[in-house]
Image: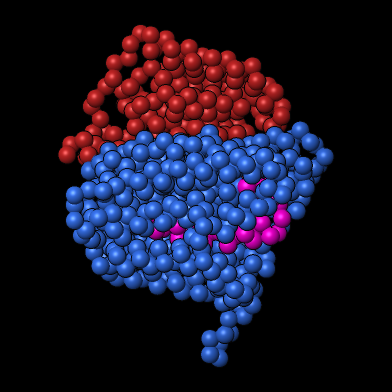
Chain colours: A red, B blue
Amino acid sequence: MENWINVAPILVITAACFFMMLTDDWKKNMISNGIVFLSAFLILIQFWSFSFSIVKLITGLMSLAILGISINRNDSIQNIKSRSEKIFRTGALTLIYLIIIFISTRVANYLSIPLELIISALFILGFGIIQLGMSQRLYKVFLAILLMFFGFELIYSANEASLLVNGLLALVMMLVSLVGGYILVSEYESREE
Amino acid sequence: MSTPIIFIFFPLSISILLYMLQKKTRLVSLIGILTCILIALFAIFQDFGGVLKIGSMSVEIKTTFSFLGRSFALSNEDRFFLSFVFISSALWFGVTGIVGVSVSFIPLGLAIISIMTGALAVEPFLYSAILVEIAVIVAIPLMIQKGKPVGKGVLRFLIFQSLAMPLVLFGGWLLGGIQASPSDASRLLQAALFLGIGFAIWLAVFPFQSWVPQLTTEIHPLIAGFFLGLFPVVTLLIMLDFISGLVWLRESLFIGPVLRLVGTIMIVSTGIWAAFEQDARRLFGYAVLLESGFSLVLVSMQSNINVKTLFISFVPRMIGLAVLALALSVIIQNGISPTIGSLKGMIRKLPFASSALLVSLLSITGFPLLAGFPFRLATLEKLGQGNLNAAMWVLVGITAFLFAVIRLLSGIASPTLEKWQAVESVSQMIYLSLGILALVILGVLPNIFGDSIAGLFIYLPILR
């Protein structure tokens, strides 16, 4: 690791991911997502230009805002998770994170990317994928897609400085959240009918 | 003037305009269809890179266009695809009115076509992954029906396509890094693996195919037909461009057998699943998968004649899927669930839709004297010459699919006490009859166009 202080944002990302894994409250999920974006930004800014890093952060936060507006009006139902479900979810994520920790040095060397960036990106990516497979709530599926893209972008952007590619990736994130919002509103409307 | 402006940015701006004019239904339909026809005619008759003469004016048609440091290129190689896509879109847009599809289908459909064309044109090819993802996202609002909850198929479709984008981008990026030292075999393999999985997800190759029959059950058949008729073709062409562009890949010993194996598995598994299927909408999804399987088998043989066969086979594929989608739309519009149980004796009530449903499915299976037959025969013949086992398995897949169609036929044609009465509207009857006629004519006279479109096949991708 180039700077040991980066352990702090990585720990924050880990804690936020575990928290999101266990809670169904949309507000807490949104805040945790925002914290993940912010922590990843703190790492990214050390290795990438300020303007590109801030674009990633703003795109992520705006996507959250768009999704949040759609959920805000409608979501009131909360699933109460059983203890065994919580243990299972925590165990699954722990397992994924352990595997990531074991392979991260090799991946960092292979891709020539700083270790802290790889760990944070893989943590976010891994959480996104596991969330995609486990979530039944619609908004969580979209949050998971956003996180998966964000995690991937952290790795990809470290090597790809093209303006068009980064612009298009930002556009994809925004469009995912827009479509997510559209689907969420449509879902709630159909439920009301 | 450049071809990317004409085929990407022009229809895209028209689609934005049409989206704002949605209340004027007829005008939107008219402009959408005319735009597609004009662009298709331009693709058929205009030499890309040549000069367009309008009276005393002459305009040079360039083949590339630079945008934010990357270029979009559409050359003579893409003329067949462009004419095919825009003609078929005109046909899809033409039937929207008669089966009650929302008019927003036209602007969004035009936008999807433009973005897909952009995906095919962008260089280097790996950026096409992002454009394909954007096209997928634009398609989602089309797939949601007002007042109905979002189905699992739509969500799965979005999730699978979202998983494919990072894989293709990452694989492409790995590959870009290797170009300097192509001798690094392990990295080449890793890049090929990432790209292979990405393409497999795009093409809904086994075991990533579960979303296709789910999607066709949940959304309007016409929208399913439009998207599933276009999307696999574009992703297949991107894959062909990719294989064609990398000498080491097209010369490698594994690419042919791997594609053949994947294609064969796809055909066999699709056939077997279809044989047990009760719902004609799901059969529609399996028909799309069967077509993709045959396309992969054709690509696996890596010869110019097979690539040409593949390109020409897009025509009966599109007509078959369009007729199938139209028939299903008419059946659903009449309040009938298209399951074998509900379709009993339906030939008496909806004779045109029932016939069109059966003829299109038989054509997709490769039944003699129908449009799909010459291509299935050619594929089996070529495959049998190279690998008899694979040909036998493909035959098993086709037989199983044919069994599914015969089950449907026995249901539709089963005797009931109802009297013969066609409840389809006149326009529906005309469109369905034209579709059946087209499938029969293309089956009886497969070379009907002769050399008139031969010019479009001069610059096909080279696979060996």
Q: How many marks?
A: 0
Residue B306 versus residue A129: which sits nearer the camera? B306
Residue B392 versus residue A62: which sits nearer the camera? B392
Query: Can you give x and y, in whole percent of width and height, for residue B238 in the image?
Result: 60, 52
Q: Is residue B399 visible?
A: yes
Query: Can you give x and y, in whole percent of width and height, for residue B139 in the image?
Result: 40, 50
Is residue B320 covered in magenta?
yes
The stretch in magenta equals B297-326
Prevailing SS of the magenta stretch:
helix
Q: Residue furthest left?
A: A193
Is residue B161 covered in magenta?
no
Please give left or right for residue A21 compared with residue B117 in the image: left
On screen, residue A7 above or below A44: above
On screen, residue B320 above or below B211: below
Please give left or right for residue A6 compared with residue B251 in the image: left
Q: Tell me what residue is drawn at x 58 percent, y 69 percent.
A: B447
Q: Tell me what residue is drawn at x 56 percent, y 77 percent.
A: B45
Q: Tell me what residue is drawn at x 41 percent, y 46 percent.
A: B406
* Location of residue B152 (image quadrant): top left
Q: Residue furthest bottom?
A: B56
Q: Is residue B15 visible?
A: no
Query: Can you give x and y, in whole percent of width and height, for residue B411 in the image?
Result: 32, 45
Q: Tell me what residue is drawn at x 48 percent, y 68 percent.
A: B441
Q: Quadrant of the N terminus of chain B?
A: bottom right
Residue A87 versus residue B452: which sits nearer the camera? B452
Query: Can you give x and y, in whole percent of width and height, for residue B42 in the image?
Result: 52, 74
Please give left or right for residue A33 compared with residue B292 in the image: left
